[in-house]
Image (cartoon, rainbow, N blue to C red):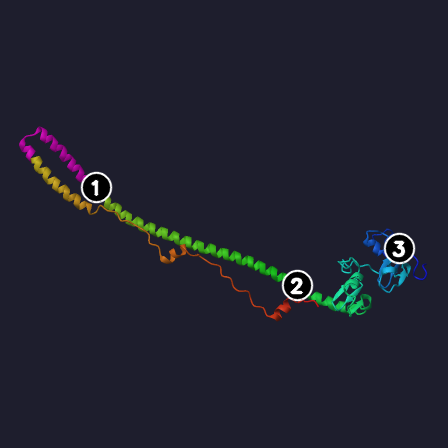
Amino acid sequence: MATGGEEESSRYVDEDAAVGGKIPAMCDPCGRRKRTTPAAVVCSSCDLNLCRECRQAHQIYAACEQKFVALDYVPTEKVLVDMQGLDQCSEHDRPFRFICKDHNTLCCDDCQFDSHRTCKDIHRIQDVGTDADSSLIGYVEEMQGTIVSARDMIESCSEKCQANDERRNQIMREIDRKKEEMINRFDDAKRRIGEELDEVLTSDKTRLDDVTLEAESVKVKLQNLVSLSDEVSKHRTGVEKTIINFTCKQKAAWATTKLAQLQKNNYSVQHTLEWSDHVLAHVDEELVTLRQAPPPSVTDTEVGKAYNCFRFV
């Protein structure tokens, strides 16, 4: 058994993964230098495990009130908790020893020496930790309430994102519906215009067919008469020539009159489209625009309530 709390001894903590269920405590400074050296003593002021060599350096350079206890005298039921680096100064890679209330910050020995020597309200952490348990309970309860607020906010954001996706799909469906309506209107217009054109063109075709038949009849009659006139002029007497000449004169006059009458019906109706101005206006304008409502106003009280999880003092 070590005496005076200063001789090297063995300190063990329960650990299921260790051989025999126990592992020895290691020197903290050596551990920061990637060395595994069994600790001999612990400085109760700093709660720092030290091997014999590091203890000598600690006696020379440490600013704490040095109280060394052999590890055999340290209660073995102490549970080691991984502080996840929260107990270490990230700038100097040393454990926090002080709390500066002037600057509301934790300090290691280097921080205290370099930046907080003139601070008035600076204390050792071990000296102000008597009421830490009660304060921690209050902070934990506040953080638990804040966790609930953060969880509700996350769920609210997720719901809003889902609502936005659904609204987008709804807008796309609305555009498709309007598109279908316009296509149907054009299809209806095409069908109606086609029916009107068919009716008008059928009437035109009937009339032009009649003109064609009668003009064909006039042409055939005149052609026959021209052939007959040629035969008579070559092989007939003067009487027959006089008759043909008289007949040709009458038929020529009749044919001219007939064709003049047919010419009145020899036309086709020309058709063009007239578009409504309000429809044509969309050719040079945006067919549809997206209207965006302004964000809802939130009062300062509501902001403080909704974002209470971010207000730590």
Extreme top residue here?
Answer: 235
Label of residue 213 in the image: 1
Residue 175 showing in the rendered view: yes
Q: Secondary structure at mark 3?
A: helix
Magenta range = 215-242
Q: Nearer the viewer, residue 124 or 299?
A: 124
Disc 2 marks a residue whose amino acid type is Ala
Mark nearer the N terminus (2 vs 1): 2
- Left or right of 125? Residue 203 is left
Label of residue 150 in the image: 2
Say whether residue 44 is magenta. no
**Mark 2 vs mark 1, CA separation in Å:** 92 Å
User: Which residue is found at the position 34% from the left and 52% from the top?
Assistant: 192
User: Mark 2 or 3, which is nearer the eye?
Assistant: 3
Disc 3 marks a residue whose amino acid type is Glu
**Quarter where residue 179 is shown:** bottom left
Return the x and y of residue 87 as percentages of the image width and height. 78, 60
**Mark 3 vs mark 1, CA separation in Å:** 131 Å
User: Which residue is found at the position 6% from the left and 35% from the top?
Assistant: 242
Q: Quadrant of the N terminus?
A: bottom right
Q: Quadrant of the C terminus?
A: bottom right
**Mark 2 vs mark 3, CA separation in Å:** 49 Å
Dot 3: within a 10 Å radius of its alpha carbon, few (fewer than 14), some, or many (20 or more) residues?
few
Extreme bottom residue here?
Answer: 301
Magenta segment's dominant SS is: helix
Q: Nearer the viewer, residue 294 or 93?
A: 93
Q: Disc 3 marks which residue?
A: 53
Would you say the residues marked 2 and 1 are in contact, meaning their CB atoms lie under 8 Å apart? no
Would you say the residues marked 3 and 1 are in contact, meaning their CB atoms lie under 8 Å apart? no
